[in-house]
C-alpha cells in the first residue's frame, strides 16, 4: 500500500494571520479539508510578523544562510489552528531582512509595492522548491508541491532542471490579473538559469513573470471555477496568457472554491446581533434593523437593503456601482458598502453617501465583523464584478439567506442560479444573474430582484434555496486530492 499522500501547500497569505483576499481564505480552509481526507497537507508561509506571532510550538528545522542570492533565513516548523480544527503543521520562513516589517504582505502602509518583492517571493519559491526535492533538509517530503498565484510561481521553474528526485507541481491561479512581473535582470538576481529567460520559460514580453513561469512549468494547473478556466483561455480575460493556457488546456482544471462553513454560519456566527437559520428567517430582520442603526440609515423593515463588501476597484465593478447608486436609491432602496482599495473610488463612494445620509452608508477599511453583519443584515448582495475567478461573497450571501445580484462571469456564473420561472419551479433559483454588464443591464437585474423581494413567498423560496446549497470544501478538496493522486503516480518517494 502506498504511503499517505503528502502535499506542501505554498502560499503568501493565510486567514486569520494575513489576508488580502480570497487566497487567504482558501489557504486556511483547503489544507484542513484535505487533512480530513487523509492527506498530509502542510503549509509553507513567509514569516511576516503576524505569522511569527500567530503560530505555536515553533522550532528551527533548517538553515538557509547558504542561499547567497537572498538574505539569511531559517525554516521554522510550527502549528497553526485553523477554523477550529486540529492544528495544521506549517513551515515558516523566518527571514527578518525580507519579512520582518510592518505593512501588508505585498505593499507598505501607503499602498506601494515592496521594492524587494522579487526577493521576498523569490525566496518563498526557492525554499518551496528545495523542500520539494531531495535537496530538502527535512525528512518530510511532499509528493506534490501545490503553488498558489504568482508568489510561488517560480517553484516549478527552480525545479525544472533539478536532476534528482522532485515532487510534482500543481499551480493554482486564484486571480490571473496579478502576475508578479519584474525586470529581466531579476533572472540572474534569483539564480534562475539564463536560458529559462525565453518564450518557452519564464519570460513574458521582455520581463520575468512569476505567474507565467508557474503556468509554463507546472505539471498541472487549476483555477478556482470551471467557468473561469474557460474564460482565461480567451482574449479579454487571459491577460496575455490565453495562448499558453489554451495550449495547456488538457492540463487545466477548474475547481470551484468552497467556503469556511464554520466561520460563515448564520446559526452560530458570533458577529451577528441575532442568529438565525432557514427555518427562522424572520430573525434575519433583527440583523437588518441593527445594521441600519449601526450604519446610520433609516430603520425600515420594508425598504430593500442592498450591500456590497469588496475590494474597491475596476475588477469589482465599483465604478458601475457608483454610477447606478442614485438610481438604485431612487427605487426606493438603501445601500451599504464596506470596502477599501482605489483611493479615487473610496472618495467618490464617501461623497455619494454623504448626499444620501438616510439611504446610503459607506465604511472604508477592512472589517471582518462588519462584513458578517452586512451579509446577514442586507436583503440582497451586489457583485457587479467585471471578472471574478471564483468569488466568495456570493456563496456567503446564499448561505445567509441574502440572494446575490451578480454578473455572469467566472465563478459567479458557476455558483449562482438565476431566478427565472423554470428555476423557481425546480427549486434551484438562488439569486439574480446579469448577462451583460453595464449600469443599465445591472439596473435591470436589480429591478428583477426588487420585484421578487416584494413577493414575500417567492423571496422566501429563493432565500431557502440558497441556504440549502452545499458550499463546503469537501467536494472541492476531493477534486484536488484526485489531481494530487494522479500527479503523484509519477513521483517516486
Ligand atoms: P477577492 O479575493 O478577489 O478579493 P473574494 O470574493 O474571492 O474576492 O474574497 C474576498 C474576501 O475578502 C471575502 O471573504 C470578503 O468578505 C473579504 N473582504 C473583502 N473586502 C473586505 C472588507 N473591506 N472588509 C472585510 N472583508 C472583506
Image: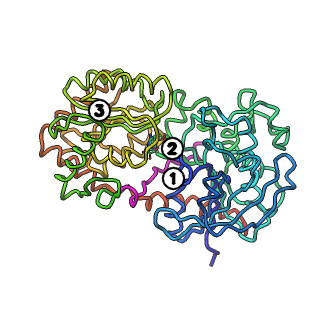
Does the magenta-highlighted stretch encompass residue 250? yes
Q: Residue at x 70, y 48 (%)?
A: 99
The answer to whether the residue bearing label 2 lies less than 8 angstroms from the nearest atom of ligand 1 is: yes
Q: Quadrant of ligand 1?
A: top left
> Which comes sooner in the sequence, label 3 or label 2?
2
Secondary structure of the residue carrying numbered label 2: loop
Q: Crowding at label 2, few (<14), some or many (≥20) Cα neighbours within 10 Å?
A: some
Q: Residue at x 47, y 36 (%)?
A: 311
> Which comes sooner in the sequence, label 1 or label 3?
1
Q: Crowding at label 1, few (<14), some or many (≥20) Cα neighbours within 10 Å?
A: many
* Quadrant of the image occupied by residue 289: top left
Mark seen at residue 83 = none
Q: Nearer the viewer, mark 1 or mark 2?
A: 2
> What residue is disc 2 on?
21
Residue closest to the eye, 330 or 272:
272
Q: Nearer the viewer, mark 1 or mark 3?
A: 3
Report the residue that reaches farthest toward the bottom.
1
> What residue is disc 3 on?
335
Residue closest to the eye, 282 or 237:
282
Q: Position of residue 166 (x, y in %)?
A: 75, 60
The answer to whether the residue bearing label 1 lies less than 8 angstroms from the nearest atom of ligand 1 is: no
Q: Crowding at label 3, few (<14), some or many (≥20) Cα neighbours within 10 Å?
A: many
Secondary structure of the residue carrying numbered label 3: strand
Q: Position of residue 350 (x, y in %)?
A: 39, 26
Q: Quadrant of the C terminus?
A: bottom right
Q: Is residue 106 left or right of residue 291?
A: right
How many angstroms separate mark 1 from mark 3 (CA)? Answer: 28 Å
Q: Position of residue 452 (x, y in %)?
A: 17, 37
Mark seen at residue 26 = 1
How many angstroms separate mark 1 from mark 2 (CA)? Answer: 9 Å
Region in magenta: 249-264
> Which comes sooner in the sequence, label 1 or label 2?
2
Amino acid at each position: 500500500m502506498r504511503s499517505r499522500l503528502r502535499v506542501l501547500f505554498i502560499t503568501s497569505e493565510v486567514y486569520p494571520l494575513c489576508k488580502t483576499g480570497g487566497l487567504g481564505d482558501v489557504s486556511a480552509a483547503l489544507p484542513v479539508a484535505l487533512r480530513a481526507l487523509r492527506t498530509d497537507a502542510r503549509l509553507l508561509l513567509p514569516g511576516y510578523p503576524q505569522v511569527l506571532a500567530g503560530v505555536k510550538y515553533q522550532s528551527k528545522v533548517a538553515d538557509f544562510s547558504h542561499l547567497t542570492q537572498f538574505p539569511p533565513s531559517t525554516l521554522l516548523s510550527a502549528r497553526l489552528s485553523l477554523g477550529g480544527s486540529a492544528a495544521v503543521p506549517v513551515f515558516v520562513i523566518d527571514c527578518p531582512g525580507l519579512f520582518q516589517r510592518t505593512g501588508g504582505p505585498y505593499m507598505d502602509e501607503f499602498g506601494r509595492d515592496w521594492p524587494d518583492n522579487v526577493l521576498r517571493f523569490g525566496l518563498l519559491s526557492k525554499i518551496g522548491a528545495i523542500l520539494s526535492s531531495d535537496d530538502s533538509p527535512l525528512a518530510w517530503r511532499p509528493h506534490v508541491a501545490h503553488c498558489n498565484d504568482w508568489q510561488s510561481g517560480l517553484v516549478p521553474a527552480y525545479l525544472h532542471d533539478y536532476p534528482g528526485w522532485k515532487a510534482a507541481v500543481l499551480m493554482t491561479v486564484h486571480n490571473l490579473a496579478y502576475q508578479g512581473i519584474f525586470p529581466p535582470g531579476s533572472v540572474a538576481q534569483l539564480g534562475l538559469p539564463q536560458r529559462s529567460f525565453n518564450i518557452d520559460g519564464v519570460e513574458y514580453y521582455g520581463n520575468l513573470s512569476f505567474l507565467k513561469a508557474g503556468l509554463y512549468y507546472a505539471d498541472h494547473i487549476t483555477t478556482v471555477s470551471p467557468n473561469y478556466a474557460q474564460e482565461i483561455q480567451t482574449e479579454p480575460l487571459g491577460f496575455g496568457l490565453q495562448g499558453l493556457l489554451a495550449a495547456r488546456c488538457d492540463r487545466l482544471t477548474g475547481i470551484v472554491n468552497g467556503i469556511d462553513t464554520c466561520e460563515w454560519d448564520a446559526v452560530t456566527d458570533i458577529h451577528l446581533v441575532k442568529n438565525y437559520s432557514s427555518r427562522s428567517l424572520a430573525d434575519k430582520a433583527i440583523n437588518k434593523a441593527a445594521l441600519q442603526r449601526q450604519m446610520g440609515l433609516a430603520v425600515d423593515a420594508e425598504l430593500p437593503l442592498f450591500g456590497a463588501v469588496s475590494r474597491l476597484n475596476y475588477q469589482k465593478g465599483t465604478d458601475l456601482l457608483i454610477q447606478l447608486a442614485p438610481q438604485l436609491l431612487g427605487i426606493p432602496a438603501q445601500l451599504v458598502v464596506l470596502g477599501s482599495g482605489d483611493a479615487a473610488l473610496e472618495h467618490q463612494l464617501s461623497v455619494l453617501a454623504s448626499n444620501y445620509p438616510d439611504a446610503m452608508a459607506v465604511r472604508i477599511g477592512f472589517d471582518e465583523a462588519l462584513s458578517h453583519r452586512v451579509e446577514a443584515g442586507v436583503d440582497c448582495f451586489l457583485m457587479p464584478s467585471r471578472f471574478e475567478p471564483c468569488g466568495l461573497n456570493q456563496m456567503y450571501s446564499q448561505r445567509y439567506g441574502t440572494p446575490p445580484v451578480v454578473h455572469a462571469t467566472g465563478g459567479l456564473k458557476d455558483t449562482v442560479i438565476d431566478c427565472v420561472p423554470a428555476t423557481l419551479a425546480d427549486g434551484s433559483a438562488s439569486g439574480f444573474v446579469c448577462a451583460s454588464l453595464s449600469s443599465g443591464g445591472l439596473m435591470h437585474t436589480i429591478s428583477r430582484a426588487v420585484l421578487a423581494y416584494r413577493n414575500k413567498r417567492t423571496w422566501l423560496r429563493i432565500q431557502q434555496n440558497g441556504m440549502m446549497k452545499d458550499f463546503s470544501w469537501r467536494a472541492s478538496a476531493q477534486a484536488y486530492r484526485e489531481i494530487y493522486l494522479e500527479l503523484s503516480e509519477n513521483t517516486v518517494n
